[in-house]
Image: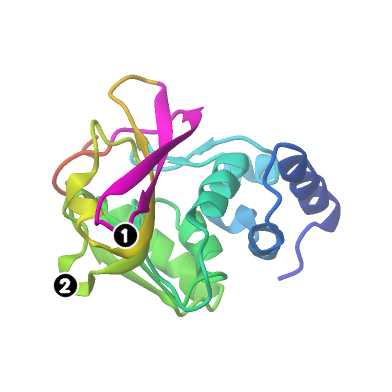
Amino acid sequence: MKLNDDRAGRLILGLRQQGVTDPKVLAAMESIDRAVFVHEKFLDQAWEDQALPIDCAQTISQPYIVGLMTQALDVQPRHRVLEIGTGSGYQAAVLSRLARYVYSIERYRSLLTEAETRLKDLKIDNVITRHGDGNLGWPEQAPFDRIMVTAAAPGEPTELLHQLKPGGILVCPVGRSSVQMLHRYVGQPDGSFRRESLSEVRFVPLVEGTAKEGQG
């Protein structure tokens, strides 16, 4: 699929000016047509730097936040990455360009089905998906080199940190209010984690369990 070069180029330039400077991350984002992942009524905004609504009262994240979190994750070509919150599938598609495998969990089955279709249409075959409770991670596939959480955890994501390899990195928004802090956890030689605060963000909350259709 040929992307809208002008609009994509302007978006990538804007991301670079905001501090997303990793060339691998920018190339990955430029290679994925965001319009595939947005509702038809928002197609004219697909290449704008803003979050957009999707089904189940969720959103497709603002491209700047996607770039910021992906850059902070420092994904390498042989890495196995766990993503909590598949949503539209856009973030998983970006990660698929950087990692060996992406394991993505979504609590809404309808969202997951739609995301799987989009990924298949784009011939992305290194994303493995699962309908489940993201708070629990994916123990059967752990440990992971990297973990990204695309919903706001109310506190430290302890269970997920336990599923990281030594020296791994986890990026997650943390907080109970409408504005959270994006944290980066970096594994240390003694098994502890160094926590870095990156930016204030706005994410939907990370909810326990799986959801029934139409459930918020």
Marks 1, 2: nearer the viewer: 1
Where residue 23 appears, x then y in whole percent? 72, 60
Question: Where, quadrant-wise, is the C terminus in this rendering?
Answer: top left
- Residue linked to disc 1: 189
Where residue 203 appears, x then y in whole percent? 40, 33
Q: Is residue 152 visible?
A: yes
State the image quarter where residue 55 is shown: top left
- The amino acid pointed to by label 2 is Glu
Residue segment shown in magenta = 179-205
Question: Where, quadrant-wise, is the N terminus in this rendering?
Answer: bottom right
- Residue linked to disc 2: 140
User: Residue drawn 43% across and 35% down?
Assistant: 182
- The amino acid pointed to by label 1 is Pro
Local SS, label 2: helix
Magenta stretch: includes residue 66: no
State the image quarter where residue 165 is shown: bottom left
**Nearer the observer, 131 or 101:** 101
Horizontally, residue 95 falls left or right of residue 144, namely right
Farthest right residue in view: 6
**Rendered view: 39 above or below 145:** above
- Which of the two labelled residues, at mark 1 and mark 2, occupies the earlier sequence position? 2
Local SS, label 1: loop
User: Residue drawn 86% across and 52% down?
Assistant: 6
**Nearer the observer, 51 or 120:** 51
Where residue 2 appears, x then y in whole percent? 76, 68
For the stretch drawn in magenta, what is the main secondary structure? strand
**Rendered view: 205 above or below 93:** above
